[in-house]
Image: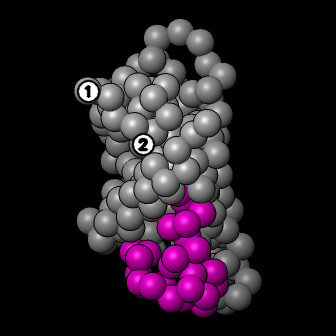
Amino acid sequence: MENKTFSLTIVSLFASLTSIGAFIKIPLPVVPFTLQILFVFLAGSLLGSKKGMLSQLLYVGIGLIGIPVFASGGGPEYIFRPTFGYLIGFIVAAYVIGLVMEKAKGAIFKKLLLANFIGLIVVYVFGILYLYIALNTWVGTPTSFQAVMMMGFAYSIVQDLFLVFFASVLAKRLYTLFSKVRINNGRLAA
């Protein structure tokens, strides 16, 4: 039986880390570059599909109730921001990364790279589609899909690919520890 207190703690920890990552940012046009996605990668890689997803659901939920944990604040009105799709992508990506890690065979580092790269694609798909829809509907700024790709993809893909690699290296180092904790029902063994 799993230690529920430990599970809640670790899910909350990754939600907190994601919120901290939101405040480490480089301003870019429309979509700022932040370290949130690094913690999304780590949540999916280390916690698995369900807990990784729960950590990001908690993060987004906390932001939507009004606590300013997102890169530009918080509150229920945040769903109308053009960049909200990236936050939806975080939830789905953490689940997908965890799922890939649970199902994939082979070397851990290769699995981590593959899982995090797929997670990055998921984040971009949700983020870019939402950005395009938002700009062309409720924001009222008609924008071509090509321009949205520049704003939501081209400006940040190089940094995000670096984060895929960095998160995979970091997760590989932490993977054994998290595996031991899972085996010991949420208790660190001496």
Which residue type does callout 1 highlight? Answer: Ala
From the viewer's perspective, tell me whether residue 44 is left or right of residue 170: right
Q: Position of residue 181 (x, y in %)?
A: 42, 32
Magenta stretch holds residue 39: no
From the viewer's perspective, tell me whether residue 103 is left or right of residue 175: right
Q: Position of residue 120 (x, y in %)?
A: 53, 44
Within 10 Å of the Cα at label 2, are there few (<14), some (14-19), or many (20+) other Cα atoms?
Answer: many
> Dot 1: what SS?
loop
Residue 157 shows in the view: no
The residue at which mark 1 appears reads as 190
Q: Is residue 74 above or below residue 171?
A: below
> Could you tell me which residue is drawn at 41 percent across and 84 percent down?
68
Residue 138, labelled with which disc? none
> Dot 2: what SS?
helix
From the viewer's perspective, tell me whether residue 97 is left or right of residue 73: right
The residue at which mark 2 appears reads as 42
First along the sequence among labels 1 and 2: 2
